[in-house]
Amino acid sequence: MMRLPKLAVSSPETIEEAAGVLADLGDRAVVLSGGTDLIPNLKRHQLTVDTVVLLGRIDDLEGIRVEGDTVHIGARTTLRAIVDSELVPSVVARAAGEVASPTIQNQGTIGGNLCVDTRCFWLNVPDLWRQAAEPCLKADGDTCWVAPAKQHCWAVSSSDLAPVLVALEASVTLVGSGGTRTMRLADLYVDDGIDYLTKSPDEIITSVTIPVDRGLDATYHKLRRRGSVDFPILGVAAAIRRDDAGVCTEARIILGAVASAPLRATEAEAALVGEPFGAESIATAAEAARKLARPLYNTDLTSRYRKRMVPVFVKRALEELAAE
Ligand SMILES: Cc1cc2nc3c(=O)[nH]c(=O)nc-3n(C[C@H](O)[C@H](O)[C@H](O)COP(=O)(O)OP(=O)(O)OC[C@H]3O[C@@H](n4cnc5c(N)ncnc54)[C@H](O)[C@@H]3O)c2cc1C
């Protein structure tokens, strides 16, 4: 059995107090929301901190509300509440329902999902197994065992909600010791398995804002080994707008779990825009996404198989939208 290391617990009542604790303690503290990602990582000694900062006593971090043309979701809102909500765009509820399993959806939150740690099978193993090899780059070693020639960490962005919310052009509001700011969710991510978020360590996501755009059709398709529990090994979020003649006027295709950040397939999008939205442009877009994606052998199933699945899943997602 893996045990948690001894930890101090801070349970602030305001978001400013929480940000203050994080600013004071620096990398010795970390935010805990639902804990479904953080607790296993702490048990595996993937990160070492001496304090966890709980968000559970802070009011206003939970709940879903509609304001004009936007939906606001508090960062501590559980995935289950999102699955069950009639206020969020249906594609968001669908992606939340694809995360892990119902038990984890009851506990895991949207804020935690968007900040979920990048994954790699050189890292996500018990401490003892990791000690059998030289530590990898993300574990403070010198070498990335996935691609030893490069001084870069390729651990995979593994959130199901991130590709969907990037495709919907969502934004996040953050509070830190320096104040409050709102940014595009896409700008939260960096394609680097170690420093995968642009937010500073003392910043806490307080809410996610999604524009409600009734002319946009969106979907999410996920590949994983089993039908439940498993993280994505490929996620495809697609959002399409068409005019009355059926010509695609806007497209966003975001690939999850093939890089350290959600990956925007801009050439695939360009293959759709200005064309009748149908079999021909979909096939060209799927091929463009295949060329772009370079999954590595760092998570479940082989990189070759995952790459071959990229056009298959892009095609499936777009065909679903075309059929609507
Ligand atoms: C068996 C298993 C299967 C899983 N499968 C999936 C899957 O299929 N898809 C998927 O997307 N995830 C999966 N997960 C990961 C995780 O359960 C979910 O991503 C979940 O939504 C994380 O939310 P949480 O509230 O539990 O995050 P936590 O564990 O509390 O936190 C995760 C990270 O986010 C940070 N954080 C949390 N909240 C905030 C905030 N408000 N502001 C700033 N930083 C914050 C924490 O410091 C931590 O670094 C799985 C986990 C397990 C154990």
Image: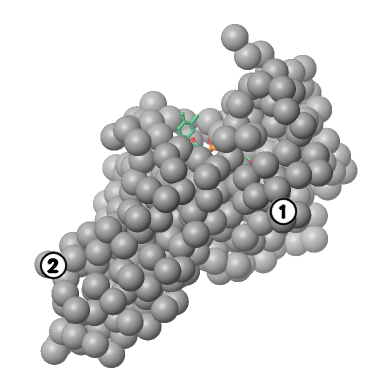
Of badges 2 and 1, nearer the viewer stands 1
Reading the image, the residue beneath label 2 is: 324
Reading the image, the residue beneath label 1 is: 149
> Is residue 77 in view from this perspective?
no
Q: How far across and how far down the image is residue 189, in percent?
A: 60, 60
Q: Which residue lies at the image location 73% right of the left edge and 28% below the top edge?
A: 133
Figure quadrant of the C terminus: bottom left
Q: Amino acid at mark 2?
A: Glu
Residue in front for this viewpoint, 194 or 102: 194
Callout 1 environment at 10 Å: few (<14), some (14 to 19), or many (20+)? few
Q: How far across and how far down the image is residue 17, in percent?
A: 76, 44
Residue in front for this viewpoint, 293 or 187: 293
Q: How far across and how far down the image is residue 55, in percent?
A: 63, 37
Secondary structure of the residue carrying tag 2 is: loop
Q: Amino acid at mark 1?
A: Ala
The mark nearer the N terminus, 2 or 1, is 1
